Amino acid sequence: MTMKTNRLISFSQFIALAALLLTLPLGAQTWTKYEAQPGSKVKLDGSSNIHDWTVEGLAIGGTMELDASFPLDASLKSVATLKVVPKVHVTIPVRSLKSGKKRMDEVMHEAMKQPEFPKIEYTLKEMTPKSAGHTPGTPFQFDTKGELTVSGVTRTNTMTVDIDVTEKGKLKVTGTTTVKMTDFGIKPPSPALALGLIKTADDVKITFEWLTAEAVGK
């Protein structure tokens, strides 16, 4: 009687263990981490009632982690839906944005509340191939959705990005998006000049080129 009971218990435990194993992934997920590299750049373009304006920055920090299924072979003729969304977090120091004019930079940094919020931040939330087809030798194109934080205010941002394999272990991410300053609680600057008041338009076009390389020894 005791032996039969022990066998029943062992069989029950086996069934429970098998059910648990079926809910687990078949293998550990493999991620490859890419880190920001020198040479990255970001540009902000806007307009006013006096003239158009541009500020540029050469510092884009952050990391990007891709799982093993992410398409990196430039010879592919098609791109399936991504199995896993990459882990992407980007930072841009507000002080790195320069116009070449000291007073304009001071006005801009003040409007962006730089002392309190020294960084612009972006975190990727969704990513899908722009289309199933891909022209071999060209960058991969994706539609993305993420959270953009400026001056302490976070808004959902959508844009198309290109990811280009520049050489083994190195990726270049480029994209363009347009945002409104007021969406982030920023009042478009209106500095006074001898000839009158400059009225800055609300829309700002952001263009970036982010260079990354595979992390070594991590």
Image (spheres, rainbow, N blue to C red):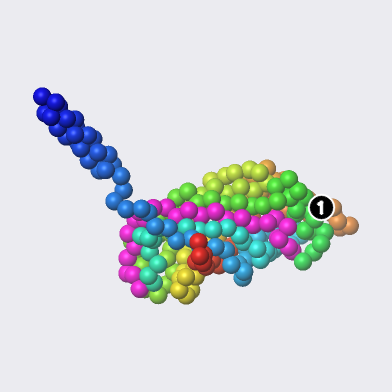
Residue 143 appears anywhere in the view? no
Could you say which is closer to the camera, residue 176 or residue 59? 59
User: What amino acid is labelled 1 in the image?
Assistant: Pro
Q: Secondary structure at mark 1?
A: loop
| Outermost residue, top side | 1
> How many marks on residues?
1
* Image quadrant where residue 50 sits: bottom right
Q: Where is residue 181 shown, x and y percent of the image?
A: 66, 48
Q: Where is residue 136 shown, x and y percent of the image?
A: 36, 73
Q: Residues within 10 Å of mark 1 (few under 14, many from 20)?
A: few
> Which residue position holds label 1?
191
Residue 27 appears anywhere in the view? yes
Residue shown at 73%/63% (left/top)?
98
Magenta: main secondary structure: loop
Residue shown at 39%/72% (left/top)?
74
Q: Is residue 73 left or right of residue 93?
A: left
- Give the extent of the magenta segment: 75-99
Could you say which is closer to the camera, residue 50 or residue 34? 34
Could you say which is closer to the camera, residue 210 or residue 11? 11
Residue shown at 36%/53% (left/top)?
28
Q: Where is residue 185 shown, x and y percent of the image?
A: 68, 43
Is residue 170 located in the magenta-colored stretch of the structure? Answer: no
Q: Is residue 176 left or right of residue 23?
A: right
